[in-house]
Each structure stands twice: as C-alpha cells, then as structure tokens.
C-alpha cells in the first residue's frame, strides 16, 4: 500500500500562501498575496533594475542641478546707492556686505546720520540680492517649489 499524501494544489490568485512557523506557532513568513492584474516591483528583475537605474540617474541630475543653482546663488550680488550718492553698497545673497564705497560728500554728514545712511543702504542692497536669489531659485525649480518659498520667506524676514 502506498501512503503518499496527494500533491498540494498551487495557490489561487488572491489566496495567501502561508510560510514558515516560529517556535511551533503558525506564522506568516512568506505570506504572499497576488492580486489579478497587479504585478510586483520585483516580478521582472530587468524591469526593476531599469527602474532603479532611472531613479539613480534622476537623483544624479537633481544633485548636479542643485550644485549649479547654489553656484548661481553664490554669484548673486545686490547693489544699492543712497539717494544723493554718498554711499554705495554691494552684498551677496545672504546679505553680507561685499563692497562699501563712501564718496567724499559722505564725510560732510554727521556720524550718526552717516551710520544710519550706511545701514539703510545695506538693507536695500541685501533686499536686491535676496530678490535676485529668489529669481534664480524660481527659474531653476519653479515659483511653487519649497526652495523658492524658503528663500522668499527668508527675504521677507530679513526685510522687516
């Protein structure tokens, strides 16, 4: 007499396949659920590798673009000149003064007035640089991007 168990039927689509047990308890190691018409990411290794390669390439391009945008923003300069031309200021995108020129006529001002005029002109130059940096980001990433919004918020905060 042959006492072999009948072969198990293959799982049906949508039916879970129970796997191993842990410490004698039924488990769901290897639980597999297949839905008709839905393929998994790893069903075809070549397709999966192509997707991963495409994702890596897209990330590389975004990183390159970010480096280019940062370099462009680093080159941004804002300029302002006082109304009568006594003070001229240049700043970078972060608002740091990169150049300050005082005309001889500035020396005719009281020290307190000259100091106020310098501060006012620095703020105007920093605002100009910030506006230019926002334009660079918007050109690269779009007006609705998080980066553009962040730079606009920074500019607004600095301008108060």
Image: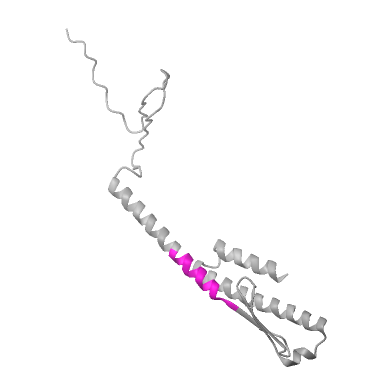
Q: Is residue 103 left or right of residue 136?
A: right
State the count of labels: 0
Q: Main secondary structure of the magenta part?
A: helix
Please say if 53 is above or below 131.
above
Q: Is residue 146 left or right of residue 25?
A: right
Please say if 111 is above or below 32.
below
Residue 108 picture location, percent across and down: 80, 91
**Which residue is outermost to the top?**
1
Specify start and end residues of the magenta stretch as a single range.
64-77
Residue 74 is a magenta residue: yes
Residue 104 picture location, percent across and down: 73, 92
Residue 37 picture location, percent across and down: 33, 42
Q: Quadrant of the N terminus?
A: top left
Q: Is residue 115 left or right of residue 158?
A: right
Which of 112 and 57 lies nearest the eye of the viewer? 112
Please say if 50 is above or below 31.
below
Residue 75 picture location, percent across and down: 54, 75
- Residue sitting at x 31%, y 30%: 12
Residue 82 is a magenta residue: no
- Residue sitting at x 35%, y 36%: 34
- Residue sitting at x 38%, y 56%: 56
> For residue 33, what is the image quadrant?
top left
Which of 103 and 39 lies nearest the eye of the viewer? 103
Q: Is residue 74 left or right of residue 62?
A: right
Q: Quadrant of the C terminus?
A: bottom right
């Amino acid at each position: 007499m042959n006492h072999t168990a009948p072969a198990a039927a293959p799982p049906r689509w949508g039916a879970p396949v129970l796997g191993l047990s842990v410490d004698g308890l039924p488990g769901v190691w290897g639980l597999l659920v297949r839905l008709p018409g839905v393929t998994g990411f790893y069903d075809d290794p070549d397709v999966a590798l192509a997707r991963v390669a495409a994702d890596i390439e897209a990330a590389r391009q975004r990183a390159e673009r970010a480096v280019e945008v940062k370099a462009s923003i680093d080159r941004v300069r804002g300029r302002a000149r006082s109304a009568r031309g006594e003070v001229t200021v240049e700043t970078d995108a972060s608002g740091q003064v990169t150049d300050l020129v005082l005309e001889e006529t500035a020396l005719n001002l009281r020290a307190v007035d000259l100091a106020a005029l310098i501060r006012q002109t620095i703020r105007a130059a920093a605002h100009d640089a910030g506006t230019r940096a926002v334009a660079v980001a918007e050109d690269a990433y779009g007006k609705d991007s998080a980066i553009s919004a962040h730079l606009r918020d920074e500019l607004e905060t600095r301008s108060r």
